[in-house]
Structures are given as structure tokens and as C-alpha cells.
Image (cartoon, rainbow, N blue to C red):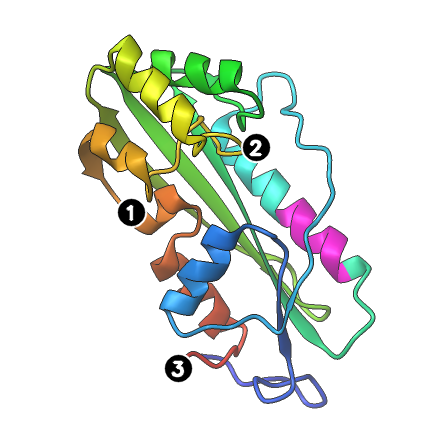
Amino acid sequence: MTSPRAGSPTASNRLLVLASESPRRKALLAQAGIVPSAIVPADIDETPKKDEVPRAYALRLAVTKAQTVLSGWSGAPAVVLAADTVVTCGRRILPKASTEDEVRACLKRLSGRRHQVTTAIAVLTHDAKPRTRVSVTRVSFARLTDADIQSYLDCGEGIGKAGGYAIQGRAETFVRQLNGSYSNVVGLPLFETIALLKGCMVAIP
């Protein structure tokens, strides 16, 4: 770990700001013993650019979220942590489902197929360029019947979730195989996140 420059904030006086209102990301940080000093969601345009690949898309959004929150931050010196999770099936980026119809369409596409979950993490301070990491997990779903999908729609878990499902809930029963980080699929890969925070001198319990 590099030593802080003269006059720069250290772990003892830097606040950790989470640029996300996701309860899942907050819970994952708590699982690692990390409690953000503040939670400030970033309101940005999340529309993919033409021909933008998932990794670049997720990275762009994570960095933009961190920059947006830091630019408006007027409190004590802070480390801003932002993340963006993208679910892709084939070459298609699946939406963050906002309606039951979108959840149904996502699950029908994922049924019996393998897909990728990509999460980009960005950590930003006033005195350094963004530090980033990307985690990719491959997930295989069992073939879902119409009854499976309707039952999942009835529980309401898929609304607001990338790809229309939450692996930490009932959708875990759909998973036939998972290769990579489980916490990445939930929304924040802990191994990569902790490595970035340590690099910014954030104290980890």
C-alpha cells in the first residue's frame, strides 16, 4: 500500500460514501464489516450507447456515478464507492426490469440458458483518478415453465433488478450452475471492492 501524500486525507479522516441506494450493496458491505458514512444515490442517464459492450457500459456508468456524487459532495474528505451491474444474454444487455412484463421477458430469455453478470466498481477521491475493477460471473438457469415464471412474478422480487431477478431470493432456485463471484451477482463483488477500498486507505475491520 502506498503512503498518503503530505497533506492528503488518511483513513482516519476520510468518509466512505456509497453512491447507491441499493439495500443489497449496503448489506454486502455490512457483511464485510463496512458501514458507509453516507449513502448518496447518483441520478444519471443509464441508456447504453450504440454498440457499447457490457464491460465498457458498466465501467462508464460506475465511474459516472462516482464522479457525479463526488462533484456534489461538500462534506469532509471522502472516498466515493460506486458500482453498476449488467446482465447479458448472448449480445443483449437485459434491462433493469421495471414492470412485470419486463421481468417475464427477461426470465423467458434466460430460461435454460447461460448468461453473464458483469459488475464494474469505481472508487474515487478528490486527489486521484478513478480506481476500477470489473467482475464477471457466468450463471446457468434451469428451463423455466410458465408456472415457474408466474410464481416468481407473484412474489414481486424481479422488479427493479437487472435481468429481472434477484439471486439472493427465490430466483436462486433457478440457478443450475454458477461460475465466479456470488456477491457479484447480488450486486457488489466483495473481493474486488475491498481491494479497491484498501488501495484508497479505507480502514477495513
Work out which quarter of the rendered image holds the N terminus and state it.
bottom left
Report x, y in % for residue 15. 64, 77
Q: Which residue is mark 3?
A: 205
**Which of the two discs, 1 and 2, labels the residue nearer the N terminus?**
2
Which of the labelled discs sits on residue 57, or is there none?
2
**How many numbered circles are shown?**
3
Report x, y in % for residue 165. 40, 31
**Which of the two discs, 3 and 1, labels the residue nearer the N terminus?**
1
Write down the quadrant of residue 167 in the picture. Answer: top left
Q: Which residue is depicted at the point 44% across and 26% down? A: 163
Which portion, as a residue range, is magenta? 63-70
Please tell me how crowded label 3 is: few (under 14), some (14-19), or many (20+) other residues with Cα within 10 Å: few
Please check the rendered image and state whether residue 38 is part of the magenta-colored stretch, yes or no.
no
Work out which quarter of the rendered image holds the C terminus and state it.
bottom left
- What SS does tag 3 mark? loop
Write down the quadrant of residue 194 in the picture. Answer: bottom left
